[in-house]
Image (tube, rainbow, N blue to C red):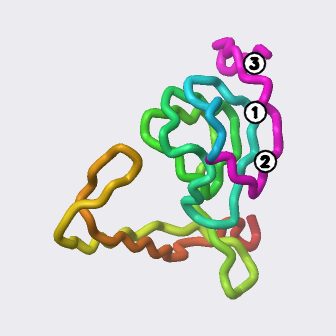
Amino acid sequence: MKETYQGIQYDCDEVYSNKDHTGHDLSDRKDISGIVIHGLCLSNETPNARVLPLDITGTTFLCCNLDNVFIPDGNTLINCSNRLFQAQEDGHDWIVEAVVQQTPQAGKMQLGGDTLDAGTQQTTYTAVQPLNPVGS
C-alpha cells in the first residue's frame, strides 16, 4: 500500500498500517523491523509501555498514535503522537514526565545474549499539565 506524506511516497506494510491496536501488546511479533507503518493506533494507558519488540530497528512510523508507547532507538517517527500521559485523581489525563532512578549493584546479569551491569531501575511519573486543558 502506498501513502504520500509531504511529497514523499512510502511503501507501507499492510498488516499493521491503518489498524487500531489500542491497548494491545505486539512485543512478540517478529515482522515489525525495517518496515513502514502508516496510521497505526497503539496507544496504551501505561506510560512507556513495552508493547513493541525491544529489538526492532529501521521501522518508520508514519502518522501513528503511539501515546505511552516506548519506541526503541533506531526507529523513526514521522508526524506521530508519542506523548506520555496518565489518568489522575481529578479524572482527567495529564501529560507526565518520566524520572528514572538507577541504583547500582555489584555484579552482572544476563539479558538475552547480553551481559549487563546488575542494578535496579525505578521510573516514576510526575504530572506536569492537563492533556486537554479546560477551555481549549
Give the position of the N terminus as an image quadrant: top right
Q: Residues under labels 2 and 3: Cα distance?
A: 20 Å
> Crowding near pointer 2: few (<14 within 10 Å), some, many (20+)?
some
Disc 1 marks which residue? 16
Disc 3 marks which residue? 3
67 up-or-down from 13: above or below: below
Q: Residues under labels 2 and 1: Cα distance?
A: 9 Å
Q: Are marks 2 and 1 in contact (CB under 8 Å)?
A: yes
At label 2, the amino acid type is His
Q: Residues in magenta?
A: 1-27
Residue at the spot x=63%, y=66% of the render? 46
Q: Residue furthest left?
A: 106
Q: Of residues 49 and 83, which is closer to you in this image?
A: 49
Our reading of the magenta stretch's main secondary structure is loop
Does the stretch in magenta take in 53? Answer: no
Residue at the spot x=26%, y=74% of the render? 103
Q: Of residues 114 and 8, which is closer to you in this image?
A: 114
Q: What is the x, y in percent for residue 17?
A: 77, 31
Q: Residues under labels 3 and 1: Cα distance?
A: 13 Å
Q: What is the x, y in percent for residue 66?
A: 65, 48
Q: What secondary structure is marked by label 3?
A: strand
* N-term-proximal mark, 2 vs 1: 1
Q: What is the x, y in percent for residue 92?
A: 73, 76
Q: Of tags 2 and 3, which is closer to the observer?
A: 2
Disc assigned to residue 21: 2
> Crowding near pointer 3: few (<14 within 10 Å), some, many (20+)?
some
At label 3, the amino acid type is Glu
